[in-house]
Amino acid sequence: MSVQTTQFSGGFQNAPTDAAHAFRAAMTVMARPGETRELTGAQAPAPLSEAAATLLLTLCDPETGVHLAGGANTADVRQWLTFHTGAPLVSASEADFAIGTWAALCPLSTYRIGTAEYPDRSATLIVDGDAEANCEVTLTGPGIKEAAHLSLPDIPTMQANAQLYPLGIDFFFTNGTQVAALPRSTQISVGG
């Protein structure tokens, strides 16, 4: 497939309906940490998963800066994202959203965590395709009835991020057509 063909293909078939379903799934997993949902509808160039592509089309627009980390930063992905969302490509320190593998996205200190006056001015990271080297943890906090479980990378870093609340970074985890989320308000413990 040529670069130009890749750039124009892979968007939503029925944009209003597909975007509404995807937005609802994204907000549901963010409101219910530890829950996993199917997220389909968009096809980005490799290496992005379908869930990650669908999130990008749903959450990004010309006002949201996106950082493509590591292997996600390809000419095909840049052109696809720009064509379908108009989102400007920015450095990690300016990103509203960043996407890549966990290793490519680290260190987290390069992203905005918000300020006391504007805690919402922080980055959201889309950790795509990292199924290996994860550890299952117990989650507690808003949106969780008693406790939930989720496999996460680098538990100490995730716990340190949660300690920053109300500041900090929010996360989506995508793999294939699956999405889960971890808002900064969620407390993380090992075991349980």
Image (cartoon, rainbow, N blue to C red):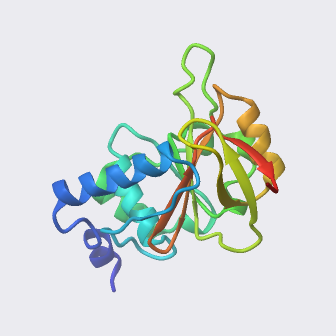
Which residue is nearer to you in this view: 189 or 8? 189
Q: Which residue occupies the extreme top position in the image?
A: 117
- Position above or below: 171 against 10: above
Q: Is residue 41 left or right of residue 32?
A: left
Which residue is nearer to you in this view: 51 or 80? 51
Which residue is nearer to you in this view: 173 or 64? 173
Which quadrant does the C terminus fall into?
bottom right
Which quadrant does the N terminus fall into?
bottom left
Place residue 92 in its image quadrant.
Answer: top right
Q: Is residue 2 left or right of residue 66?
A: left
Q: Which residue occupies the extreme bottom position in the image?
A: 1
Residue occupying image coordinates x 25% and y 52% = 20
Q: Is residue 56 left or right of residue 151?
A: left
Residue occupying image coordinates x 72% and y 45% = 108
Place residue 17 in its image quadrant.
Answer: bottom left
Q: Which residue occupies the extreme front position in the image?
A: 146
Q: Where is residue 39 shown, x and y percent of the image?
A: 39, 65
- Position above or below: 171 against 100: above
Residue occupying image coordinates x 46% and y 49% = 89
Q: Where is residue 144 shown, x and y percent of the image?
A: 57, 43
Q: Where is residue 83 shown, x and y percent of the image?
A: 29, 59
